[in-house]
Protein backbone atom coordinates (compact mmCIF):
# COMPACT_ATOMS: atom_id res chain seq x y z
CA UNK A 1 0.00 0.00 0.00
CA UNK A 2 0.96 3.65 -0.28
CA UNK A 3 2.83 5.60 2.29
CA UNK A 4 1.06 7.09 5.32
CA UNK A 5 -1.72 4.49 5.03
CA UNK A 6 -2.97 5.94 1.77
CA UNK A 7 -4.60 3.36 -0.46
CA UNK A 8 -5.25 5.86 -3.26
CA UNK A 9 -3.43 9.13 -3.98
CA UNK A 10 -4.76 11.46 -6.67
CA UNK A 11 -2.82 14.60 -7.53
CA UNK A 12 -4.03 17.12 -10.09
CA UNK A 13 -5.70 14.58 -12.39
CA UNK A 14 -7.21 16.09 -15.54
CA UNK A 15 -8.78 14.17 -18.40
CA UNK A 16 -9.83 15.78 -21.66
CA UNK A 17 -11.71 14.23 -24.56
CA UNK A 18 -11.15 16.71 -27.36
CA UNK A 19 -12.50 20.03 -26.10
CA UNK A 20 -14.46 18.40 -23.26
CA UNK A 21 -12.86 18.40 -19.81
CA UNK A 22 -14.26 15.32 -18.11
CA UNK A 23 -12.09 15.52 -14.97
CA UNK A 24 -10.68 18.91 -14.00
CA UNK A 25 -7.58 19.07 -11.76
CA UNK A 26 -8.87 16.64 -9.13
CA UNK A 27 -6.82 15.85 -6.01
CA UNK A 28 -7.65 13.72 -2.96
CA UNK A 29 -6.41 10.76 -0.90
CA UNK A 30 -8.25 7.61 0.20
CA UNK A 31 -7.13 6.05 3.48
CA UNK A 32 -6.66 2.29 3.81
CA UNK A 33 -9.73 0.32 4.91
CA UNK A 34 -12.22 3.18 4.55
CA UNK A 35 -15.31 3.33 2.36
CA UNK A 36 -14.79 6.45 0.28
CA UNK A 37 -17.87 7.75 -1.52
CA UNK A 38 -17.57 9.64 -4.80
CA UNK A 39 -20.90 11.39 -5.24
CA UNK A 40 -22.19 13.35 -8.19
CA UNK A 41 -24.78 13.47 -10.98
CA UNK A 42 -24.52 11.39 -14.13
CA UNK A 43 -21.89 12.94 -16.39
CA UNK A 44 -19.99 14.59 -13.52
CA UNK A 45 -16.76 12.67 -14.19
CA UNK A 46 -17.07 9.79 -11.72
CA UNK A 47 -16.70 6.89 -14.12
CA UNK A 48 -13.90 8.57 -16.06
CA UNK A 49 -11.90 8.92 -12.84
CA UNK A 50 -12.57 5.28 -11.93
CA UNK A 51 -11.33 4.21 -15.35
CA UNK A 52 -8.15 6.22 -14.78
CA UNK A 53 -7.58 4.74 -11.32
CA UNK A 54 -8.18 1.22 -12.64
CA UNK A 55 -5.68 1.77 -15.52
CA UNK A 56 -8.25 1.63 -18.34
CA UNK A 57 -7.76 5.28 -19.36
CA UNK A 58 -4.63 7.43 -19.14
CA UNK A 59 -4.99 10.91 -17.65
CA UNK A 60 -4.25 13.97 -19.76
CA UNK A 61 -2.22 15.40 -16.88
CA UNK A 62 -1.61 14.81 -13.19
CA UNK A 63 -0.70 11.60 -11.38
CA UNK A 64 -2.35 8.89 -9.30
CA UNK A 65 -1.13 5.99 -7.22
CA UNK A 66 -3.26 3.00 -6.25
CA UNK A 67 -1.97 0.53 -3.65
CA UNK A 68 1.33 2.42 -3.85
CA UNK A 69 1.74 1.98 -7.62
CA UNK A 70 1.59 4.55 -10.38
CA UNK A 71 -1.53 3.94 -12.47
CA UNK A 72 0.30 4.70 -15.74
CA UNK A 73 3.84 3.42 -15.16
CA UNK A 74 2.94 0.40 -13.01
CA UNK A 75 -0.48 -0.54 -14.36
CA UNK A 76 0.04 -4.32 -14.09
CA UNK A 77 0.83 -4.05 -10.38
CA UNK A 78 -2.24 -1.85 -9.83
CA UNK A 79 -4.50 -4.41 -11.54
CA UNK A 80 -3.14 -7.18 -9.35
CA UNK A 81 -4.18 -5.33 -6.18
CA UNK A 82 -7.67 -4.16 -7.15
CA UNK A 83 -11.14 -5.54 -7.83
CA UNK A 84 -13.53 -3.62 -10.08
CA UNK A 85 -17.31 -3.83 -10.36
CA UNK A 86 -18.37 -1.56 -13.26
CA UNK A 87 -21.84 -0.17 -13.85
CA UNK A 88 -22.56 -2.62 -16.65
CA UNK A 89 -23.29 -6.22 -15.63
CA UNK A 90 -20.41 -8.31 -16.97
CA UNK A 91 -21.15 -11.82 -15.64
CA UNK A 92 -21.75 -14.41 -18.37
CA UNK A 93 -25.45 -15.29 -18.61
CA UNK A 94 -24.67 -18.64 -20.23
CA UNK A 95 -22.59 -19.83 -17.28
CA UNK A 96 -23.57 -20.67 -13.72
CA UNK A 97 -22.69 -18.43 -10.82
CA UNK A 98 -19.98 -20.86 -9.74
CA UNK A 99 -18.51 -21.03 -13.26
CA UNK A 100 -18.36 -17.23 -13.50
CA UNK A 101 -16.38 -17.08 -10.26
CA UNK A 102 -14.16 -20.01 -11.19
CA UNK A 103 -13.11 -18.46 -14.49
CA UNK A 104 -12.35 -15.17 -12.75
CA UNK A 105 -10.14 -16.96 -10.22
CA UNK A 106 -8.28 -18.70 -13.05
CA UNK A 107 -7.59 -15.32 -14.67
CA UNK A 108 -5.74 -14.34 -11.49
CA UNK A 109 -3.97 -17.72 -11.25
CA UNK A 110 -5.55 -18.60 -7.91
CA UNK A 111 -4.62 -22.23 -7.16
CA UNK A 112 -7.42 -24.76 -7.67
CA UNK A 113 -7.83 -25.83 -4.03
CA UNK A 114 -7.72 -22.27 -2.73
CA UNK A 115 -10.04 -21.09 -5.52
CA UNK A 116 -12.64 -23.72 -4.65
CA UNK A 117 -12.56 -22.83 -0.95
CA UNK A 118 -12.84 -19.09 -1.62
CA UNK A 119 -15.71 -19.47 -4.05
CA UNK A 120 -17.65 -21.62 -1.59
CA UNK A 121 -17.08 -19.09 1.20
CA UNK A 122 -17.96 -16.08 -0.96
CA UNK A 123 -21.14 -17.66 -2.29
CA UNK A 124 -22.20 -18.32 1.29
CA UNK A 125 -21.36 -14.72 2.19
CA UNK A 126 -23.58 -13.30 -0.58
CA UNK A 127 -26.38 -15.79 0.03
CA UNK A 128 -26.11 -17.56 -3.33
CA UNK A 129 -25.02 -21.06 -2.30
CA UNK A 130 -28.38 -22.58 -3.26
CA UNK A 131 -28.21 -20.93 -6.69
CA UNK A 132 -24.50 -21.52 -7.34
CA UNK A 133 -25.07 -24.02 -10.13
CA UNK A 134 -27.96 -22.21 -11.80
CA UNK A 135 -27.37 -20.18 -14.95
CA UNK A 136 -26.85 -16.49 -14.23
CA UNK A 137 -29.57 -15.81 -16.82
CA UNK A 138 -32.05 -17.00 -14.17
CA UNK A 139 -30.79 -14.54 -11.51
CA UNK A 140 -32.58 -11.36 -10.50
CA UNK A 141 -30.77 -8.04 -10.89
CA UNK A 142 -29.91 -7.90 -7.20
CA UNK A 143 -28.62 -11.48 -7.19
CA UNK A 144 -26.48 -10.84 -10.23
CA UNK A 145 -25.01 -7.70 -8.66
CA UNK A 146 -24.13 -9.62 -5.49
CA UNK A 147 -22.50 -12.32 -7.61
CA UNK A 148 -20.41 -9.73 -9.44
CA UNK A 149 -19.21 -8.17 -6.19
CA UNK A 150 -18.36 -11.62 -4.80
CA UNK A 151 -16.56 -12.56 -8.02
CA UNK A 152 -14.01 -9.76 -7.77
CA UNK A 153 -13.10 -10.93 -4.27
CA UNK A 154 -11.83 -14.33 -5.39
CA UNK A 155 -8.25 -13.04 -5.67
CA UNK A 156 -8.51 -11.05 -2.41
CA UNK A 157 -7.92 -7.51 -3.70
CA UNK A 158 -6.85 -4.84 -1.23
CA UNK A 159 -8.93 -2.16 -2.95
CA UNK A 160 -12.44 -2.59 -4.33
CA UNK A 161 -13.88 -0.15 -6.89
CA UNK A 162 -17.68 -0.08 -7.10
CA UNK A 163 -18.96 2.13 -9.92
CA UNK A 164 -22.66 2.85 -9.33
CA UNK A 165 -23.18 -0.64 -7.83
CA UNK A 166 -26.97 -0.33 -7.45
CA UNK A 167 -27.86 1.63 -10.58
CA UNK A 168 -30.93 0.19 -12.26
CA UNK A 169 -31.97 -1.87 -9.24
CA UNK A 170 -35.34 -1.52 -7.57
CA UNK A 171 -35.31 0.00 -4.04
CA UNK A 172 -35.63 -3.39 -2.32
CA UNK A 173 -32.72 -4.88 -4.26
CA UNK A 174 -30.69 -1.74 -3.61
CA UNK A 175 -31.09 -2.16 0.15
CA UNK A 176 -30.14 -5.85 -0.13
CA UNK A 177 -26.89 -4.83 -1.81
CA UNK A 178 -26.28 -2.20 0.88
CA UNK A 179 -26.75 -4.82 3.61
CA UNK A 180 -24.33 -7.10 1.77
CA UNK A 181 -21.71 -4.34 1.50
CA UNK A 182 -21.97 -3.69 5.23
CA UNK A 183 -21.50 -7.41 5.87
CA UNK A 184 -18.59 -7.40 3.44
CA UNK A 185 -16.86 -4.74 5.51
CA UNK A 186 -17.21 -6.93 8.60
CA UNK A 187 -15.87 -10.04 6.85
CA UNK A 188 -12.97 -8.55 4.86
CA UNK A 189 -10.33 -5.89 5.38
CA UNK A 190 -10.22 -3.71 2.31
CA UNK A 191 -10.57 -0.21 0.97
CA UNK A 192 -13.77 0.52 -0.95
CA UNK A 193 -14.04 3.30 -3.55
CA UNK A 194 -17.75 3.80 -4.25
CA UNK A 195 -19.19 6.04 -6.95
CA UNK A 196 -22.87 6.87 -6.85
CA UNK A 197 -25.46 9.50 -7.67
CA UNK A 198 -27.75 8.22 -4.92
CA UNK A 199 -27.48 10.54 -1.91
CA UNK A 200 -28.77 7.96 0.57
CA UNK A 201 -26.29 5.38 -0.70
CA UNK A 202 -23.31 7.69 -0.18
CA UNK A 203 -24.53 8.78 3.24
CA UNK A 204 -25.38 5.25 4.40
CA UNK A 205 -22.18 3.50 3.33
CA UNK A 206 -19.36 6.06 3.22
CA UNK A 207 -17.07 7.25 5.98
CA UNK A 208 -15.97 10.17 3.81
CA UNK A 209 -17.53 11.60 0.69
CA UNK A 210 -16.15 13.68 -2.17
CA UNK A 211 -18.84 15.53 -4.12
CA UNK A 212 -18.01 16.11 -7.79
CA UNK A 213 -19.80 18.26 -10.33
CA UNK A 214 -18.73 19.09 -13.89
CA UNK A 215 -15.40 17.36 -13.35
CA UNK A 216 -14.43 19.27 -10.18
CA UNK A 217 -14.56 18.27 -6.52
CA UNK A 218 -16.71 20.85 -4.75
CA UNK A 219 -16.71 19.37 -1.23
CA UNK A 220 -14.96 16.60 0.71
CA UNK A 221 -15.44 15.27 4.23
CA UNK A 222 -17.57 12.96 6.34
CA UNK A 223 -21.34 13.25 5.75
CA UNK A 224 -21.76 14.95 9.12
CA UNK A 225 -18.91 17.38 8.43
CA UNK A 226 -20.34 18.31 5.05
CA UNK A 227 -23.82 18.87 6.46
CA UNK A 228 -22.49 20.95 9.34
CA UNK A 229 -21.10 23.46 6.84
CA UNK A 230 -24.63 24.44 5.79
CA UNK A 231 -26.31 27.19 7.83
CA UNK A 232 -29.55 26.13 9.51
CA UNK A 233 -30.32 22.64 10.77
CA UNK A 234 -33.64 22.28 8.89
CA UNK A 235 -34.74 22.96 5.34
CA UNK A 236 -38.29 24.10 4.74
CA UNK A 237 -39.40 23.46 1.15
CA UNK A 238 -42.33 25.62 0.09
CA UNK A 239 -44.15 25.46 -3.25
CA UNK A 240 -46.14 28.60 -4.03
CA UNK A 241 -48.51 29.60 -6.80
CA UNK A 242 -46.05 32.39 -7.57
CA UNK A 243 -42.78 33.76 -6.22
CA UNK A 244 -42.64 37.50 -6.67
CA UNK A 245 -39.66 39.63 -5.66
CA UNK A 246 -41.76 40.95 -2.80
CA UNK A 247 -42.34 37.44 -1.43
CA UNK A 248 -38.67 36.50 -1.79
CA UNK A 249 -37.52 39.71 -0.06
CA UNK A 250 -40.00 39.12 2.76
CA UNK A 251 -38.61 35.62 3.41
CA UNK A 252 -34.99 36.80 3.21
CA UNK A 253 -35.67 39.50 5.80
CA UNK A 254 -36.88 37.08 8.49
CA UNK A 255 -34.18 36.99 11.21
CA UNK A 256 -34.41 33.19 11.57
CA UNK A 257 -33.70 32.54 7.87
CA UNK A 258 -30.07 31.72 7.07
CA UNK A 259 -30.33 31.18 3.32
CA UNK A 260 -32.79 30.52 0.52
CA UNK A 261 -32.51 28.58 -2.74
CA UNK A 262 -35.13 29.01 -5.47
CA UNK A 263 -36.06 26.38 -8.06
CA UNK A 264 -38.99 27.44 -10.28
CA UNK A 265 -41.90 27.97 -7.87
CA UNK A 266 -40.27 26.08 -5.01
CA UNK A 267 -38.21 27.88 -2.40
CA UNK A 268 -35.91 26.06 0.02
CA UNK A 269 -35.49 27.99 3.24
CA UNK A 270 -32.59 27.11 5.57
CA UNK A 271 -33.66 27.74 9.16
CA UNK A 272 -33.20 26.57 12.72
CA UNK A 273 -36.23 24.80 14.20
CA UNK A 274 -38.20 24.43 11.00
CA UNK A 275 -41.37 23.17 12.68
CA UNK A 276 -41.50 26.24 14.88
CA UNK A 277 -41.04 28.75 12.04
CA UNK A 278 -43.11 27.07 9.30
CA UNK A 279 -46.44 28.69 10.31
CA UNK A 280 -44.80 32.09 10.43
CA UNK A 281 -43.25 31.60 6.98
CA UNK A 282 -46.62 30.64 5.53
CA UNK A 283 -48.26 33.70 7.08
CA UNK A 284 -45.55 36.04 5.77
CA UNK A 285 -45.91 34.64 2.23
CA UNK A 286 -49.71 34.97 2.39
CA UNK A 287 -49.46 38.57 3.59
CA UNK A 288 -47.08 39.29 0.71
CA UNK A 289 -49.65 38.13 -1.84
CA UNK A 290 -48.64 34.49 -2.29
CA UNK A 291 -50.39 31.19 -1.70
CA UNK A 292 -48.60 28.07 -0.43
CA UNK A 293 -49.52 24.93 -2.36
CA UNK A 294 -47.34 22.50 -0.38
CA UNK A 295 -44.84 22.57 2.47
CA UNK A 296 -42.33 20.06 3.84
CA UNK A 297 -39.60 20.05 6.47
CA UNK A 298 -36.54 17.82 6.43
CA UNK A 299 -33.17 17.62 8.09
CA UNK A 300 -30.13 18.40 6.01
CA UNK A 301 -28.81 15.66 3.73
CA UNK A 302 -26.03 15.37 1.19
CA UNK A 303 -28.57 16.53 -1.37
CA UNK A 304 -28.68 19.82 0.50
CA UNK A 305 -24.88 19.98 0.54
CA UNK A 306 -24.90 19.61 -3.24
CA UNK A 307 -27.56 22.29 -3.62
CA UNK A 308 -25.66 24.56 -1.22
CA UNK A 309 -22.53 24.41 -3.40
CA UNK A 310 -24.10 24.31 -6.87
CA UNK A 311 -27.55 25.86 -6.56
CA UNK A 312 -29.13 22.79 -8.18
CA UNK A 313 -30.22 19.32 -7.15
CA UNK A 314 -29.01 15.94 -8.35
CA UNK A 315 -31.91 14.65 -10.36
CA UNK A 316 -32.54 11.01 -11.18
CA UNK A 317 -31.70 10.46 -14.83
CA UNK A 318 -32.81 7.63 -17.05
CA UNK A 319 -30.21 4.86 -16.97
CA UNK A 320 -28.36 4.89 -20.26
CA UNK A 321 -27.68 1.74 -22.23
CA UNK A 322 -23.94 1.20 -22.33
CA UNK A 323 -21.58 -0.81 -24.47
CA UNK A 324 -19.67 -3.60 -22.76
CA UNK A 325 -16.57 -2.69 -24.76
CA UNK A 326 -16.77 1.05 -24.18
CA UNK A 327 -17.66 0.66 -20.53
CA UNK A 328 -20.46 1.78 -18.28
CA UNK A 329 -21.18 5.39 -17.56
CA UNK A 330 -19.83 6.76 -20.83
CA UNK A 331 -21.98 9.74 -21.82
CA UNK A 332 -23.31 10.40 -25.26
CA UNK A 333 -20.28 12.41 -26.30
CA UNK A 334 -16.73 11.40 -25.45
CA UNK A 335 -17.41 9.85 -22.06
CA UNK A 336 -17.25 12.02 -19.00
Image (cartoon, rainbow, N blue to C red):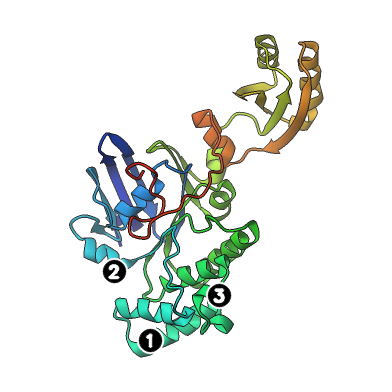
- Residue 130 position in % (x across, y down): 58, 83
115 horizontally vs 132: left or right = left
Report the disc number at residue 80: 2
Q: Earlier in the sequence, mark 3 or mark 2?
A: 2
Q: Residue 332's spot in the image, x, y percent?
A: 39, 43
Rendering coords of residue 143 (x, y %): 56, 70
CA–CA distance in space, label 1 to label 3 = 27 Å
Quarter of the image with the C terminus in it: top left
Q: Please give the residue where the numbered disc 1 appears in the rendered image.
A: 114
Earlier sequence position, callout 2 versus callout 1: 2
Q: Residue at x 57, y 58 (%)?
A: 169
* Discs 1, 3 touching: Cβ within 8 Å: no
Name the secondary structure under disc 3: helix
* The image quarter in which residue 212 lies: top left
Q: Earlier in the sequence, mark 1 or mark 3?
A: 1
Residue at 69% over, 16% down: 251
Q: Gap in Å between the C-alphas at discs 3 and 2? A: 31 Å
Label pair 2/1, CB-CB below 8 angstroms: no
Q: Which of the two discs, 3 and 2, sits closer to the camera? A: 3
Q: Which residue is mark 3?
A: 138
Amino acid sequence: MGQDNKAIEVSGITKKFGSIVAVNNVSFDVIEDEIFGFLGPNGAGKTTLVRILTTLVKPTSGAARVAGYDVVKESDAVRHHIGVVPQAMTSDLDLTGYENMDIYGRFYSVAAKERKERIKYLLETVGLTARAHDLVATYSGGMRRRLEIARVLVHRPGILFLDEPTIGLDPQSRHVVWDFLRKLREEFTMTVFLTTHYMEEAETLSGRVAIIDSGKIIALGSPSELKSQIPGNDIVSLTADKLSENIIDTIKNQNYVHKIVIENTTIRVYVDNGAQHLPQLIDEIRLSGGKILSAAIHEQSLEDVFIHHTGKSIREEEVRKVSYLVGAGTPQKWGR
